[in-house]
Image (cartoon, rainbow, N blue to C red):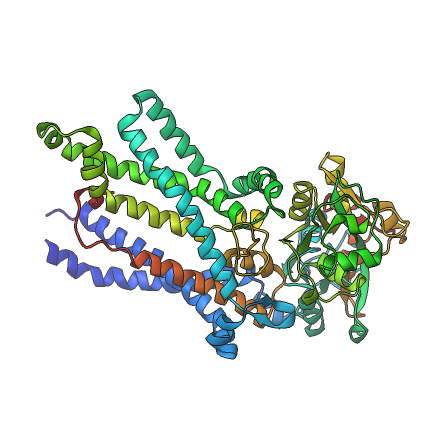
Amino acid sequence: MRLAHGRCLPGGTWGILLMTLVVAPLWMATSGCSTSTTLPASATDQPAGRAVDQDQADPVAMPLQGRVILTGSSTIAPLIVEIAKRFEAQHPQVRVEVQTGGSARGVSDVRQGTADFGMVSRHLKPIEGDLVAYEIARDGICLIVHADNPVPSLSREQVLAIYRDEVADWKDVGGSQAPVVTVHKAEGRGTLEVFLSHFELKNEDIHPDVIAGDNLQAIKSVAGNPYAVGYVSIGAAEAEARLGTAIRLLPAGEIAATSSNVAEGRFPMVRPLTLVARDSLSPLASAFLAFVRSGQHTDLIEAQYFVPVAP
Amino acid sequence: MSLWLPDRWLTTGSRICVVIASGLAILMIGFILIEALPALRQSGLSRLVGDAAWLASAGRFGVTPLLAASLAVTAGALVIAVPLGVLSALFLEVYAPAMIATGYHRMLELLAGVPSVVTGLWGLSEVVPWINRMQPPGQSLLAGCMVLALMILPVIALTSAMAVRRVIYEQRATALALGMRRDTFLVRIVLPLARRGILSGVVLAFVRAIGETMAVVMVCGNTVQIPSSLFSPVRTLTANIALEMGEASGFHRSALFLTALLLMVVIAATLLMPEDQSASPGGRHA
């Protein structure tokens, strides 16, 4: 009995090996995607979105088809995914692929032609002048303190002193006697970069008490700690404050931290959320860009706590 | 011998499943290894262990403070949860009236099922402010220990209860025949014999605690440093990966995979370590 079973097994074992061989590449491919290293093979040998029909004059007769590929900032990606869903609903033969990996990846993928658009959540650098940036929304960053903190505002010098650990007590910056707890962001976060460049700080110089991963965590950290100060996206802070979370948004100088001040360009600590591309766009890519910038997606933009901009 | 042999199909089927499952595990470990290799090769283990700071923008990737934080948080959680868990097990199996025991058992199961993000949110909005009143900033090693203890308590309590129940079932008649007192029976007979079962629960709890990410990111403060007191904010290996993976590329990304590898080595070492030589009836099936 046992021997008979043993003998029939090798055949089965080959099947198993074969199956592993099939499962393995599949699994590697999916894992590669989620960790944002690989593009689908077809994306590299065939420029994305070029499969569009030439007849652009009559989109009804000749519906858009093909693929739009966007890579880059994980800040922008969720917004683009939502807008892409609407675009795909209107154009069933179009697939929009969104992959994250940071603004730097967006820039390099566009240059190499493996993506139609790079999602870049900062201003383009001078050496990136070969690319064109299209602003789709804006993100303002402000300092927040606990709602019970009596400090009305913080000057640039005071913020610098606090984050450099030169001031350790609130009474030195116009508050009541209490230790200062600084809430900082993790390396690579867009809000961190805007904060550092606005205050001309180096990350090495900062000795924070708490490091938060995202805006929500920073807000919760400040709301749960009467001594804390942090900086977050204005949209997110406004929404939380409206819900009654115990935080207060500090103005920058005289300018109140509000979404409308960000939209009108008055608030200083701001970053643009952009799609960058080379100067020539495929018909499909330009149709997608026009759709994104049509001004019809303010609901989606506000749901991500960003500030819509006039197209 | 009929052509249709359920046993044969079961044998083949189970072997297929095992190969798929272990194949996936091996592939994943291989993937982590391959991704970690550039960091390991470029900077060498000594620099990664020797550097006391993890500062990606400055090109410094010291894993020692992260490892120290992970071990400290986990050890602290075990210090809180092991006594609570083992005593809970005794309560469940010996002291509690049937109805209360059932209720407590259900509650532990429910606690085991609470998602870590919920526990973390509770920690951030309740435990952290409470610690902050004692010593700011509140987000600290201690907060991590407390939140993790809550998460692993049911694991320890339920596995220990299983081990204790079995020993009591096997040894009660002997103890009664010898006229043994209940406390003597529990301390001298039940706990020693249930040791392996309890230990396996502790190991499971250790693995769960050191691998926990979400709750730890929320309550530990995430400052990279070797903790100097229970109130120091710390960043664990898992928190570090979660915080920086989104935007990491190149060497930084590889260094993050290296920390993942380190974590798996710690877990593997733990799983292999506590093999108790003396066979005990309590642990055999627990």
**Towards the viewer: A49 or B115:** B115
Image position of A77 (left or right of B255): right
**Residue at horizontal 70 percent and vertical 51 percent from the top:** A84
Q: Position of residue A30 (x, y in %)?
A: 51, 59
Q: Quadrant of residue A125?
A: bottom right
Image position of B157 (left or right of B193): right
Q: Position of residue A203 (x, y in %)?
A: 69, 65
Identify the image quadrant of the C terminus of chain B.
top left
Q: Is residue A110 above or below residue B66?
A: below
Q: Position of residue B24 (x, y in %)?
A: 39, 59
Q: Position of residue B98 (x, y in %)?
A: 30, 22
**Residue at horizontal 23 percent and vertical 48 percent from the top:** B10
Image position of B67 (left or right of A158): left
Residue A19 visible in the current orientation:
yes
Q: Quadrant of residue B92?
A: top left
**Towards the viewer: B265 or B233:** B233
**Towards the viewer: A176 or B163:** A176
Q: Is residue A281 above or below residue B178?
A: below
Residue A58 visible in the current orientation:
no
